[in-house]
Amino acid sequence: MVRKDEIDLGLWNNISASKLIMPVDTHIARVSQKLGLVKRKSIDMKFAIALTSKLKKFDANDPVKYDFSLCHIGIEGKLHDTFKLK
């Protein structure tokens, strides 16, 4: 709703993408932990804030843009293949 691109509707003009917090489901949590982005065990708001903070180091203007990638790596079970993890 915030971004204006070919996928997102861009209807919310008063919210900056930099202010969003990463939504966390089981797939995003698992991938984030495996990649060492978040060490927290509890999947809660603190986890989401910690992950968002870490992702801001990659893109401070839109840290949540990584949601689709992180989620689908987990859904497809490609984590080990994609990142050569043991």
Image (cartoon, rainbow, N blue to C red):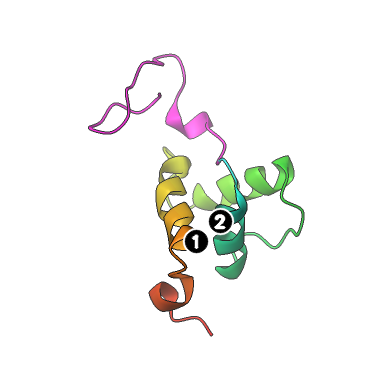
In depth, the one of 6 and 37 nearer the eye is 6
Q: Is residue 52 left or right of residue 5?
A: right
The residue lying furthest to the left in this view is: 6
Q: Quadrant of residue 5?
A: top left
Residue at left 65%, top 43%? 49
Left or right for 77, reference 27: left
The image position of residue 61, as x and y in percent, is: 42, 37
Q: Is residue 33 above or below residue 6?
A: below
Q: Amino acid at mark 2?
A: His
Q: Which type of secondary structure does the marked residue at label 2 adopt?
A: helix
* Residue 6 inside the magenta-drawn segment: yes
Which residue is pictured at 39% across the width and 73% down the height?
82
Q: Are marks 2 and 1 in contact (CB under 8 Å)?
A: yes
Report which residue position mark 1 lands on.
Answer: 74
| Any part of residue 80 in sight | yes
- Dot 1 lies on which element? helix
- Alpha carbon separation for disc pair 2 and 1: 5 Å
Residue extent of the magenta highlight: 1-22
Q: Is residue 37 visible?
A: no
* Magenta span main SS: loop
Compared across the picture, whether 13 is left or right of 41 comes to: left
Q: Residue furthest bottom?
A: 86
Q: Residue furthest front?
A: 76
**Image x and y of residue 28, in percent:** 55, 54
Q: Name the amino acid type tagged 1.
A: Gly
Residue 16 colored in magenta in the image: yes
| Residue 72 image point, x, y percent | 43, 56
From what the image shows, is residue 15 above or below residue 23? Answer: above
Q: Position of residue 84 (x, y in %)?
A: 44, 81
Q: For residue 27, which numbered disc appears in the image?
A: 2
- Judging depth in this view, the residue of 38 and 78 nearest the camera is 78
